[in-house]
Image: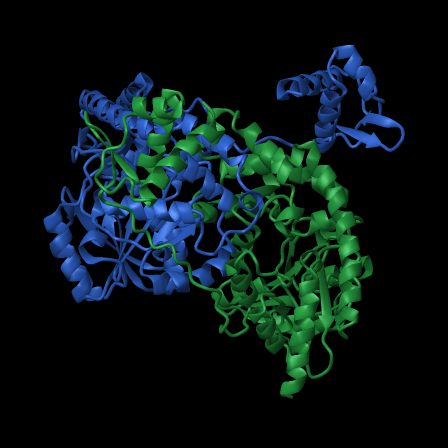
Chain colours: A green, B blue
Amino acid sequence: MTISKIERVIAFIQQEISNKKLIAGTRLMSVRQLAQHLNYSVSTVVEAYARLVAEGLIEARTGSGYYVSTKMQVIHNIEKPVQYEREVDPLWISRQSLEAKSDVIKAGCGWLPVEWMPELSLRRALKQVAKAEASLLVDYPIPHGHLGLRQWIARKNKKYDLELSVSQILMTDSATQAIDLLFRKLLKAGDVILVDDPCYFNFLALSQVHDLQVISIPFTEHGPSVQHFQQALLYQPKIYLTNSGIHNPTGATLSIAHAYQIAKLAEQANLIIIEDDIFAEFEQIPAPRYSSLMGFERVIQIGSFSKTVTAAIRCGYIISHEKFIDECIDLKIATNFSGGHLNAEIIYQALLDSSYKKHLDNLHKKLLKTMQFTIQSLAKLGIEPVIIPKAGIFLWCQLPKQMNASVLSKLCLKQGVILAPGNSFSQSPDAGQFMRFNVAQCGYKKVFDVLESAMEEMKNIQ
Amino acid sequence: MTISKIERVIAFIQQEISNKKLIAGTRLMSVRQLAQHLNYSVSTVVEAYARLVAEGLIEARTGSGYYVSTKMQVIHNIEKPVQYEREVDPLWISRQSLEAKSDVIKAGCGWLPVEWMPELSLRRALKQVAKAEASLLVDYPIPHGHLGLRQWIARKNKKYDLELSVSQILMTDSATQAIDLLFRKLLKAGDVILVDDPCYFNFLALSQVHDLQVISIPFTEHGPSVQHFQQALLYQPKIYLTNSGIHNPTGATLSIAHAYQIAKLAEQANLIIIEDDIFAEFEQIPAPRYSSLMGFERVIQIGSFSKTVTAAIRCGYIISHEKFIDECIDLKIATNFSGGHLNAEIIYQALLDSSYKKHLDNLHKKLLKTMQFTIQSLAKLGIEPVIIPKAGIFLWCQLPKQMNASVLSKLCLKQGVILAPGNSFSQSPDAGQFMRFNVAQCGYKKVFDVLESAMEEMKNIQ
C-alpha cells in the first residue's frame, strides 16, 4: 500500500465529482468494485475513502456504502490580497512579506529563500522522528523543554567561552515569544528600555504592545554609541535589547572594546542586557557576546532556529541564571502552557544530521558571493552600504539624496518586489534615507530593474 | 545505509569513550579502518562520525582525522526534582504534572496517557510530511496560518450548524496563546471578566498575569447560574470565558435553555463570550455552542489539537469575524511573529489519516468504561461525583466531610500520585472539599490505594 496509489484514487474521485459525473448524494462504487476497476488493492481504496470522508467530500452511511456528501463543502478559500495601501510602520515589512504571493520577490524580508534552507536535513529528521518513542510524539515535555536541544545550545555556547548548565535554558515557542515573556517578567507599562537605532522592527512593535518608552541609541560600525548610551542612562532604563553577533538591520558586528564599555555602563546602571542571538549560525568568526564578558547574572540571551534550520517550526529559547529561568516557567505555563516536544525533536535531529553542517558551510559561501553581487548591483543605482558586513544576510544602505525609502518601497511593491524601508527600523527623522536589503533574496535581476524604474519614476514626480 | 547501523557505530564509539579505551585527544580509527573492522559501508561510518561531531563528542582535524574531543562535554543534566513543598495555587497541578517523573501517576492532570493518544496517526503523518514540498518544511506560512487546517476547522463547525469562511480563522501556537492574545487585544489591567466557579485553573493564572478582576459564576449541571450571571453584569464585565462542549473541571455540558438565557444577557450587557472548544473531540453528541446561537459577532471560539491528536506539537486557533481576525494578526506578529506551518501540516495529516477516526471511536468507548470504573472505585472511598458527565475525561468529586483537598493532594504526591485539588480551580471558600479526577489516568489500582491510605492518615491526624 503506497501513498501515491492512495492519492491517485483520491484524485480519481475528486475529478469525478468536479466533472459532475458524481453529484451530491450519489452512491460511490463499493470499495471492492473500485479496487477491481482500478486494479488496486482493497486496502488502498479503503484508505483513500477514509481520507475523503475525513476531508468531508464523501460520507459513509452504515450498511449502505459511501455517498458524495450532500453537505458539500463550500469553504471560502479567498485570502486577502497584499495590502498595498498600509502605511509604513514597524509591522509593514512582516505583513507584506508574510502575505506575499509566491511570485513576489521579498528583497526586504528577514529570512532565507526556501531553496537555501536545509531541506534534506529536515526530511531526514522527520523520517527519524517518525520512529521516535511514543511519549515524544504525543506528550507534553517537562517545563524546561527538550533536553537534547538544551544540551546542543549549551555546547554551542562553548564557542563563546560560556559554561552552561541545561537548567539555565528554557525552551520557548519562538525568539519573539521569548522576548515577550521577558518583557512581561521584567517590565511594566511606562518603563524605559534602550534599543539600537536602527533596530529590528519587531523590537519596536513589541515595545508598543507593552506600552514602553523606547530610547534609541545610534548604532555604529562597532556597536552602540557609548556616549549616547551613557547619556540615556539618566532616564533609568531597565533593559537594553540588542542583537548579538550580527546586528539587524545594519549587519555590523560588536567590537570587544565596545562590548567592554557597554558592559561596564550596564553594571553601573543596574541594567539588564537582552541579547538576541538569532543570527549566530551565519557567523564564521564569532563576534563578542555580552554574556561572554558578563555571564548570565545581568545578561539574558535568546535565540531560535528559524533562520538556518526552519521557519516552519516554532522553537526558541531563553538563557539566564537558574533561579530566573525557574521563575519564568510559571509565566510560560500561564501564558502558553507548554513548549512543543516534537517541534524541538525535529529541530534537534535536523541539527545532528550530517547534512546540516554541509548546509551551513555552503550557506556561508553563497552569502559572501551574493553579498558582493548585491553591493555591486546597488552601487550602479547610487545606493551605497553604510557598513560592509563581515557575514549574514543584511545590507543597510543609504539611498541617493531626495529619495524616500517608504515611497520607493510602495512603488516597488506594486511591481512585485518587497523592500524594507528604513522607517520600519527607526523612529529617527532621517530613517527614510535608508533601506535594508536581504542579500540572499537579491539574486534576481528583477530586484534591480524594478528599483531602477521606481527611482526613475520618483525623479520625474519631483 | 540504514539508521540502525549508524546508531550501532555511534554506540560503539560512545562505549569506547565511556570505557576509557578512548580518552580525550585520542585519534579514532579512520573511517575506512572502522568500516572494515565492523564490516559496514564507509558511508555508514561517515554519517556516524558526522553525528558524533555534531554532538561534540569527537572533533575533525583537517587532514589528520577524527579525535576524541578535548573540550569534553560536561553538561549538567540534573533536572530539578518535583517541588513537593509548593503551595496549592492555580499553577500547582500544571507544574507538578509537567515535572513528574515517568513512574508518577498523574490522576489529576488534564490530558490523556501516552498510550491513549493516536501514535499511529502521528507516525504516518510524519512520514507523509517528510515528502511535502520544501516551502512547507522551511518557510513561514501566511499570517492566517495553514489553509488545510483552517478548512478542516471550518468543516468541523458544520456539526454545530456554523458556516465559516477560512478568513474567520487564525492559527495560533496553542489555545492558551489564543486566550492570551485575546486578553491583550480586548482587555486592560483592572478590567472585569467572568469565569465559571470552578473553572480551568489556567484561566485564573492567565487573569493574574493580565491583572484582571475575576468574578466567578457558580456552574451548575446545565451551565452557569443565570441568576448569578445577571447579578455579575452590574460590575460591567467585558468578557465571559468558559468551555464549550465539556466543562473543565466539572464535566458538565451546557443545556440549550441555559445557553439561550446567557446569550440574551451577554447581548444586553455588550459582553463578549470566549468559548474554549478544546474538548470537542471527546463529545459523542455535541452540546450547544454559544457560537451556534449567536454567530461570531459576539462569540470568539478558541481551540487546539493537544487533547486528542498530540500535546507535543503547538497548534491552536481563534475563530471570530473577519475584521477582528485581521486586527489580531498585527498583535500576533508583534508578540509571536508567525505560526508553525510544519506543526500545522503534521496535525493536518494526522487528522486526515484513516487511523485517527478509529482512534477517536476507540477513545470514546474506553473513556465511558474508565469513567464507570473510576466512579465505582471512588464510591468505595466515600468520594462522590457532583455531576455524572456525559463524556470526556473529567470527574468533579466531593470529598468526605473534614477532608481537605490540598492536604490530601500533598500526601498523595509523596506516594507518587498527582491529584487536582479543588482550590486550584476556584477561589470560593469551600473549594477545598472538591477534587478533579482524570478518569483516563485512573486505570491503576495504585491511585485508589494511595488515596485510601492518605485519607486514613488524615483521619488519624485529626
- Residue at coordinates 59% horizontally, 45% vertically from top-left? A310
- Residue at coordinates 43% horizontally, 50% vertically from top-left? B172
Left or right, B126 with respect to B61, comes to: left
Task: Look at the image and tell me whether residue A298 can be seen.
Answer: no
Along the line of sight, the residue nearer the viewer: B153 or A396? B153
Q: Quadrant of the N terminus of chain A?
A: top left
Along the line of sight, the residue nearer the viewer: B418 or B331? B331
Q: Quadrant of the C terminus of chain A?
A: bottom right
Left or right, B349 with respect to B282, comes to: right
Left or right, A394 with respect to A40, comes to: right
Question: Is B450 above or below relative to B336?
Answer: above
- Residue at coordinates 46% horizontally, 38% vertically from top-left? B346
- The image shows a total of numbered marks equal to 0
Q: Quadrant of residue A238?
A: bottom right
Along the line of sight, the residue nearer the viewer: B435 or A425? A425
Where is residue A435 drawn, in percent x and y? 67, 70
Where is residue B270 drawn, in percent x and y? 22, 66
Q: Quadrant of residue A268?
A: bottom right
